[in-house]
């Protein structure tokens, strides 16, 4: 299999601007394994290619979701949003 653009799979909205390459490979157990090389620990799998892509999208969402404590601004730090 090859690389695909994540943007082709259920975009979350018009504000989604980041395109990530996803690698899909057959697993040893007959499942499809999907991972995002740009996000080193984002791996998932599924019984079908589509399920693997759906699952890796969820893994990426969780990977990018910050902890609420990371978003607390105070007098020593500022929290800003960067659109990529």
Image (cartoon, rainbow, N blue to C red):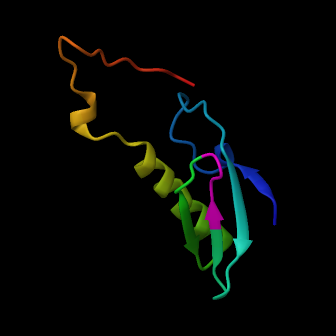
What is the x, y in percent for residue 14?
A: 55, 30
Q: Residue furthest top?
A: 75
Q: Nearer the viewer, residue 26 or 55?
A: 26
Quarter occupied by the C terminus: top right
Q: Quadrant of residue 25?
A: bottom right
Q: Nearer the viewer, residue 7 or 29?
A: 29
What is the x, y in percent for residue 55?
A: 52, 63
Residue at image position (32%, 19%) is 79
What is the x, y in percent for residue 60?
A: 50, 50
Reply yes or no: does residue 51 show up in magenta. no
Q: Quadrant of residue 43?
A: bottom right
What is the x, y in percent for residue 9?
A: 63, 51
Bounds of the magenta span? 34-38
Q: Nearer the viewer, residue 73 or 22?
A: 73
Instruction: Name the chief secondary structure element in magenta.
Output: loop
**Considering only vertical position in the picture, is 70 above or below 27?**
above
Number of labels in the image equals: 0
Residue at image position (67%, 86%) is 28
**Considering only vertical position in the picture, is 4 above or below 67?**
below
């Amino acid at each position: 299999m090859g690389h695909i653009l994540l943007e082709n799979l259920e975009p979350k909205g018009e504000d989604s601007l980041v395109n990530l390459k996803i690698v899909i490979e057959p697993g040893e157990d007959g499942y499809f394994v999907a991972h995002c090389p740009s996000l080193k620990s984002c791996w998932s799998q599924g019984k079908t290619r589509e399920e693997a892509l759906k699952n890796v999208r969820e893994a990426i969402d969780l990977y990018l979701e910050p902890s609420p404590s990371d978003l607390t601004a105070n007098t020593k730090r500022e929290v800003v949003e960067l659109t990529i």
